[in-house]
Amino acid sequence: MVLAVLVAGLVAPVSMLAADPITGVVTNKTTNKPAAGDEVVLIRLAQGMQESTRTKTDAKGRFTLPVPEAGLHLVRVTHDKANYFRPAPEGTQSVEVEVYNAAAKVDGITGEAEVIRIQTDESGKELKIIENFFVKNESSPPMTQFSDRPFEFYLPAGAVVQGSAALSPGGMPVQASPVPLGDPNHYAFVFPVRPGETRFQITYKLPYTGSLKFAPRPVMPTDTIAVMMPKSMKFAAGAQSSYTAVTEETTAQTYVVRGAMPSQPLEFTVSGTGQMPRDPAPGAGDPPAAGGGAATAGAGGAATATNDTRPGGGLGTPLDPGGVNDTLSKYKWWIIGGLGLVLAVGAGVMLQAPKTPAAVAVPAGAVPSGGSSGSLLGALKEELFALETDRLQGKLSEGEYLVQKAALEVVLKRALARDGASEAGA
């Protein structure tokens, strides 16, 4: 009898932690048919990312995943070797995931922009560079480009990579390390380029003696190449380059080339020293910059461009390829804010609550575009960006960084759980 009581006492907590299974359906948006035979995995996010249970979709794309322990989870679906994710906050009973057929090369993929942000360190002996690639996938029917080199790019000779990340349409940044390819300074991000806009960001440093020549090499037609640097530095375009200055009042100087082709001369030289100022507080109607503060971004409750999670959305109006409305409004908060990226992969960075059950499935889920919950999640995202930036710039000790990151992740988990509960009751 005593033994039975002890066993019951040990088993009871486990059964109390168990949750109802998660059911769902996976749709192949390339064919608009159910995705049969896809592998589905439940990932537990209590401490890191731990695989919990797995199954496969049936002929109608349906699946059921047992949930051994209640808590925050992630549902991962693998289709054509590419992964698609949906968050599953505690209490989630069903999810819908959209996937796409994948190929090594997909028609309809071009560069929307390449943005290069340059400054020196305080000694003036190193250049610190943050480079962003905005890639648009307008394939028809929609497909994912994925292989051992789905997105290729070049870095200047001597570049030392310090951090890198990738962002799927509507998602949040995840750590993605560049892979060196055969020829010098040639790299690839092994990260699926899904329909919509995928963003890649890489930070690196270069030795500097007061002047340095750059020769960007886009690997695909690119709508806009933009170079931003402090006003105390000098920019000189190459003899055959067609850079034009952007005259918008900002805290930095910016030069752009439009309609850039892989074979086009794009050389430029920078000289002098200077650091980019901290990003200013955004004005009315502007998206909150990194570090803008959760209180400011979350108080209004109104959706901003930063909270827009439609494929290709999220940063406001794009650069006008014709030069009519040259405001850099889509990219200025990326390049002014200088978002440092060695981003941790975990619950705080991998997850946001889904916008709707039919939202495009991406590694970070989708952010609600309206209401106070969406504003809070957007503000938390900005704070995570700012925290990583301060860490890279040496403004936080490792202890301070860990404490602040843990606090943000706790708040984010609570927001996700609350949002999931409100959706379930709707």
Image (cartoon, grey):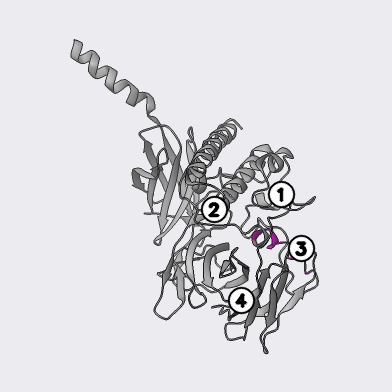
Tag 4: Cα neighbours inside 10 Å, few (<14), some, or many (≥20)? some
- Determine if residue 171 is in view: no
Query: For mark 2, what is the residue?
Result: 394
Foreground residue among 55 and 382: 382
Tag 2: Cα neighbours inside 10 Å, few (<14), some, or many (≥20)? few
Main secondary structure along the magenta-highlighted residues: loop
Q: Residue at x 71, y 42 (%)?
A: 296
- Residue found at the very far top of the displayed protein: 1
Quote the CA–CA distance across marks 2 and 3.
25 Å
Mark 3 or 1, closer to the camera: 3
Q: Quadrant of the N terminus?
A: top left
Foreground residue among 361 and 416: 416
Q: Which residues are magenta?
A: 326-334
Secondary element at image label 4: loop
Quote the CA–CA distance across marks 3 and 4.
24 Å
Quote the CA–CA distance across marks 1 and 2.
30 Å
For marks 1 and 2 on the same chain, the one whose residue lies earlier in the sequence: 1
Secondary element at image label 2: loop
Q: Label 3 is placed on what type of residue?
A: Thr
Query: For mark 4, what is the residue?
Result: 210
Foreground residue among 30 and 250: 250
Mark 1 or 2, closer to the camera: 2
Q: Which mark is residue 304?
A: 1
Mark 3 or 4, closer to the camera: 4
Q: Tell me, yes or no, whether the two marked residues, 2 and 3, touch with CB atoms within 8 Å.
A: no
